[in-house]
Image (cartoon, helix red, strand yellow):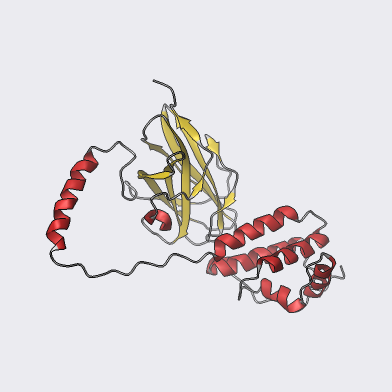
Amino acid sequence: MNGRTGRPENPVDPADGPLARFAHELREVRERAGRPSYQELAKRSRAVGRPYSVSTLRNAASGTTWPTEDVTEAFVRACAHYADSPAEATVERLLDLRQQLSAPAPEPTPARARPRWLFPVAAAICCSVLAIGIMLVPGDSGGSASAAPQTITAGPADVALSGTCRDPVYAGRVTAEVRPCIAVVDDQLRTSVLVRATAPTPEVTVHVWLHDAVGRAALKGTLRSCRVIFEEAGHSALCGPFAVDAPENRVYSTAVSVEYGTPDAPAVWGDAKATGTQSPVLPWRVGKR
């Protein structure tokens, strides 16, 4: 590599949104390769059988448009040559991240006017549902978080985890990674998640709940939330652990969703299954009576 890096690029802030975050990730790949020029990357893309022009590869990391999957792979493989490292794992990670970040957000359902005669009927139904809800098994009730969200300031120190935890995975549209965990402590199920900022990140809300892995359903009465403030990239915080009640003889995992701002419930909460990002599964008192 001749050390030329070409003209300076406009800065991108990964906190500006999914497209900016993906451009930031591509630039990080190029940075770790020693910042080869785009002319060099274009030349190398031809050598790996995915020929693209200088302008196409530059636009891929510009933060102004989504690169195709093929352009993304060509960019990563060309950089891997200069980094002298295998490309497969990075290609897979970037393609997965592109799919997550470029997925369109669900559109809100517009409200419609309701006939006046529905209001007394709705009131009667609500009373009936409330009476039935009192008899529901703990953990199966609907609704949002049952307690006010914790507010946590993330820090640079390592955080001790307990139970069975997933390896770090990107948290969807947020510039952070998560490690959801599930444990049994003092004969009670506990959910928690470690969240770490991978880039300068504003305040986020972490939602944690218990997921029935066999029935494929969220136990909405177990929803808990944390507001996490990141002062620097690389800082971590532990949301939880939360003691939760759940029916026995089932298999559970901890599910998590991380979002910017302070929403009261996860964006996926309208889906009865609401899978989120999940920990490994844990049988809960299966066969023990």
Name of the residue lying farthest toward the top: 289
In the rendering, at what x and y percent does residue 289 appear? 39, 20
Compared to residue 82, the image places residue 181 above or below, namely above
Residue 131 at x, y percent in the picture: 18, 43
Residue 121 in picture, x, y percent from top left: 14, 57
**Camera-nearest residue between 15 and 109:** 109
Residue drawn at point x = 72 percent, y = 63 percent:
73
Q: Is residue 37 left or right of residue 195?
A: right
Residue 43 lies left or right of residue 106; in this view the side is right
**Residue 6 in the image: above or below residue 102:** below
Is 12 situated left or right of 190 in this image? right
Residue at 49% x, 34% y is 282
User: In the figure, residue 100 lies in which quadrant?
Assistant: bottom right
Residue 211's image quarter? top left
Percent of width and height locating residue 249: 41, 29
> Is residue 230 at all visible to an observer of this figure?
yes
> Which is more toward the observer, 27 or 202?
27
In the picture provided, is 43 more to the left or to the right than 252? right
| Viewer-nearest residue: 30 or 110 | 110
Q: Which residue is at 46% across, 37% downward?
A: 252
Q: Is residue 161 visible?
A: no
For the N terminus, give its image quadrant.
Answer: bottom right
* Image quadrant assignment for residue 187: top left
